[in-house]
Image (cartoon, helix red, strand yellow):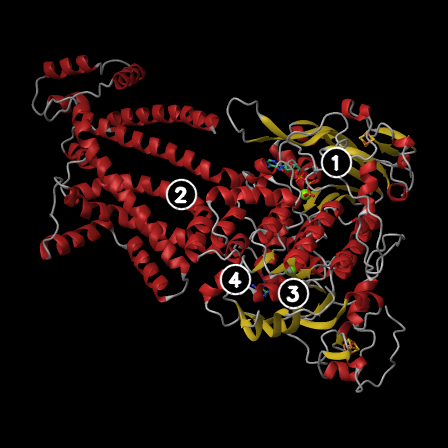
Amino acid sequence: MNTTAEKNIILQVDRLKQYFPVKKDSIFKPKAYVKAVDDISFELFEGETLSIVGESGCGKSTTGRAILRLDEPTDGKVLYMGKNILTLNKKDMRKLRGDLQVIFQDPFASLNPRQMVKQILNEAMAIQNVVEKSKRKERMLELLGYVGLPPESLDRYPHEFSGGQRQRIGIARALAVNPKLIICDEAVSALDVSIQAQILNLLKKLQKQFKLTFLFISHDLSVVRHISDRVMVMYLGKVVEIAEKKEMFDSPLHPYTKALLSSIPVPDPTLKRDRVILKGDVPSPIDPPGGCRFHTRCPFAIEKCKQEEPPLRELVNNHFVSCHIAETLPV
Amino acid sequence: MKERNKPILEVKGLKTHFTTKRGVSKAVDGIDFTLHKGETLGIVGESGCGKSMTSLSILRLIPSPPGKIAGGSVLFKGRDLVTMPEDEMRKIRGNEISMIFQEPMTSLNPVIPVGEQIAEALRLHQKMGKKAAWDKSVEMLKMVGIPSPEKRAKQEPFQLSGGMRQRVMIAMALACTPEVLIADEPTTALDVTIQAQILELIKELQTKIGMGVIMITHDLGVVAETCDKVAVMYAGNIVEHASTEQIFADPKHPYTQGLLNSLPKIHEDQEELITIDGSVPSPYNMPAGCRFASRCPYAEDICAAHQPDLVSYSEDIKVRCWKYTDKWTGKRDKEGVV
Amino acid sequence: MLMFILRRILQTIPVIIGVTFVVFFIMQLVPGDPAVLLAGEGASKETIEAIREQLGLNQPLYIQYFEYLTNVFKGDLGVSLKNSQPVLDEILVRLPITIELAFFSIIITIVLGMAAGIISAVKPYSLTDVSVMLVALLGISLPSFWFGLMLMYFFSVKLQILPVAGWDSLLHVILPAITLGAGGAAIVARMTRSSMLEVIRQDYIRTARAKGLRERIIIYKHALRNALIPVITVVGLQFGALLGGTVLVESIFAINGLGRMIVDAIRMRDLPMVQGGVLFASLIFVVVNLFVDVFYRFFNKRIELN
Ligand SMILES: Nc1ncnc2c1ncn2[C@@H]1O[C@H](COP(=O)(O)OP(=O)(O)OP(=O)(O)O)[C@@H](O)[C@H]1O
Ligand SMILES: Nc1ncnc2c1ncn2[C@@H]1O[C@H](COP(=O)(O)OP(=O)(O)OP(=O)(O)O)[C@@H](O)[C@H]1O
Ligand code: SF4
Ligand code: SF4
Ligand SMILES: [Mg+2]
Ligand SMILES: [Mg+2]
């Protein structure tokens, strides 16, 4: 968590857009799109953890998928160590896949139901050829130990595990190939707090040891607070705020971030807090509001907000926000 | 809701076992609890301890083979679901007892529009017409906070974000206004603002129709905000059962204490989170004594030798630990929690 | 989707040209001089030379091929050596018969195969399942000519409820269609079963159950659609095998279809007829594959994206 100046940029996302076509109601209407990610830019420094938070459907997973080219982005660039991965051919991309790993919320969907855990792990290692054949078994047991699963799990099929156990298999698989950058999409959300703590500690340890970089997508703000160096807030396909973690949690600038941070449930039944409950319906990314996208629900919106889109600007040191009147808002 | 209403669901000695090549896995091994009208019971516990299998057993949705309800009963308004004929059971599922499944990604049919997946239950149980059921399902999607619900209803699951899929599941479960809702990690994929909205919606239904809720979650914040009482599970057993205030203020069982300890603190920075050392025993090979003994900082000889029972500690606290019985010879305070 | 269909149609063009190429060279591969063959035994040198001239056999091969190609596109497949009738006319008489046979056979393959597969999958490892799968195994291993003859012996000769051979009424269709469709049905049944069993284990089937839906609706609405995706490919492959099988079945049951025509033509060394027959059979194959692909894509679109 030292200053950003001395860090290498490992991944740079430049004006990324991802639009998905929506079925038209009639052939006479113009083609509609879900603007899932609409012109966002940010960078990731080597060895850091950047978290993405934001309302459900705001484009977090889509951002992650676009970086991995699981969907083909509509526009923009993704530079990994200076190379634009969106233009790589299949072969080079496959080589890169070892460096870039992803852990999904529900890995069951991506775990082959006909493979036992040992086959799943073995295949991952074989494809990227990271561990010698003779050492693979040992490595598998080590990985299972990391994620707190017993050795006999190797001979079981994914459907024989509980939700949290499956998630840990997904984590073990991602770690198997010694990646450089891991995108964790709700990677610990199905885990109880003690296992979650164990995995978060592990991720932090590995990060220190191997200079791993994490792009961490999560709704659990206490986890985000624990693991991140920086936090990025998205709203309806746009980045609305980026800052160092402490700065973000202590003095959020964007009205949406403020509302978000105020609704964290606290594990203390005696505490009743004031929440900023957002009024108004969540606007749809199919037809996002003009100007500032948050203006339909923002308690501070002024006339200008409906007309003009606020740019992402650096208000305090390394603290970027996209709001016309951020500096005048009450703390 | 604090006044003790009629019990609506009584689970007694429920056991669910899986028979596989490697032996018998006792995923659920004797669970007892009672849910009253309008009440919310939280179930928390270590990943793999049998929370989902307990709830699937209630609706008899255990994959069988290899799974099987090996004993116990589940009384719903006085009738035993375990022995009920299949066609009567069907009238209860999705209508009187609904379930929100843990995996929103795989729990929706990939080739059927989500609106139809909600509407079909309405047509079946509420005898609604095609149009009425569709309109109602659009309305349900709106209620769970999905923007442009008319358009979204026509989309297939892969076109929705994770949180939207989870909300479709929730809309599906609430559509027929069930008397009991079993929610298995209902808000893991939701951001806190939507989560608050959904929990509010559930609460509303509870006051309106007296729905009883079983809330399975590892988010202790959600437990604190929504639950009246909490059952803590460990390795197929309930190890502690008490009111929510009680559990958070003064957890009795060493596992519960460890669990609360490993919470990341939202208002302070920790370099490393506290964990519970060791791991759960294999469900194929449960120890004879206390199942937490290998990880428990207090364990004594008796712990390894005999399994403690779930016994009343006070009027509304039950705990499964030798420490709180007169067989205990060791220290009684809670110093030295790791 | 439209783009895909268009692209797929364009892709068939080189395939069709390839087919004509192969068919043309069958002629070249046949031992002996085609002109001699055409003229018949004991014809004079002049006649042979005249035929050679007339057919352009003196020209270089590529020109011959080109001419053949233009003729094909004009619909001129030459004349039969046997009866001097245009080959195309003969094919157009025979083709509907074979298509009819293939149609009924594939219906049997699909309906019988899927039904058996579903019945098996609904109660796996039950007595019904085991017996159905045993029959399916037999269906795969039995040679179809033997199966056809047994059917004929049993139903036509012994019981005398179905005609022995020929192609006059719908009753005539039954035995050949069963003979031809049975092998495919067995394969489809096994595929359907394993695919259904896999789908039934999925979480979304559990969700459907949790809604209180009837087992029938769960099977037909929720499971089948997902389970059919791999089955469609198998059916497509079966269609190819089935076209090959028509040759045999038409011979056994004395049906005057395209397959039998080709066999007869080969026996009579009626080369233009062989060429025409093979060309048409290949075309059917290509077209069917096109349909299967488009169909599969349509079904699979969402799965792929998921
Ligand atoms: N098909 C199966 N065969 C054998 N064992 C199984 C099968 N399904 C589940 N189990 C076992 O049953 C136990 C309980 O699983 P369950 O899904 O109830 O856990 P859970 O408490 O819901 O955990 P989580 O919080 O991770 O979802 C686990 O140890 C799991 O491995
Ligand atoms: N394949 C797709 N086709 C059409 N629309 C899609 C597709 N994938 C995502 N979307 C849409 O893109 C938007 C952003 O989705 P995304 O999954 O990125 O959200 P998210 O921020 O990850 O939300 P959540 O927290 O709920 O997971 C949503 O409106 C979603 O419906
Ligand atoms: S720009 Fe206007 S509408 Fe947008 S967040 Fe700032 S004050 Fe609110
Ligand atoms: S019974 Fe013994 S081992 Fe088990 S929790 Fe109590 S003190 Fe610990
Ligand atoms: Mg997501
Ligand atoms: Mg579970």
Helix, strand or loop at mark 1: strand
* Label at residue B37: 3
> Mark 2 to mark 1: distance in Å?
43 Å
Amino acid type at circle 4 is Ile
Picture quadrant where residue C283 is located: top left
- Where is residue A225? Give x, y as percent: 83, 48
**Label 2 sits on residue:** C232
x then y, percent, for residue B43:
70, 64
Residue A213 screen position, x and y as percent? 78, 43
* Residue to which mark 1 is pinned: A235
CA distance for labels 2 and 4: 36 Å
- Counting labels gives 4
- Mark 1, ligand 3, within 8 Å: the answer is no
Q: Nearer the viewer, residue A201 or B76?
A: B76
User: What is the distance, in whole Å, between disc 1 and disc 4 at their CAs?
Assistant: 40 Å
Residue pointed to by mark 4: B92
Asked whether disc 2 touches disc 4, contact meaning CB atoms under 8 Å apart, the reply is no
> B210 or A321, which lies in front?
B210
Disc 3 to disc 1, C-alpha distance: 39 Å
Identify residue type, mark 1: Tyr
Cα–Cα gap, marks 3 and 2: 50 Å
**Nearest-to-viewer mark from 1 and 4:** 4
Closer to the eye: label 3 or 4: 3
Question: Nearer the observer, disc 3 or disc 2?
Answer: 3
**Camera-side residue of C47 and B310:** B310
Using a 10 Å C-alpha cutoff, classify the residue at mark 3 as few (fewer than 14 neighbours), some (14 to 19) or many (20 or more): many
**Mark 2 touches mark 1? (CB < 8 Å):** no
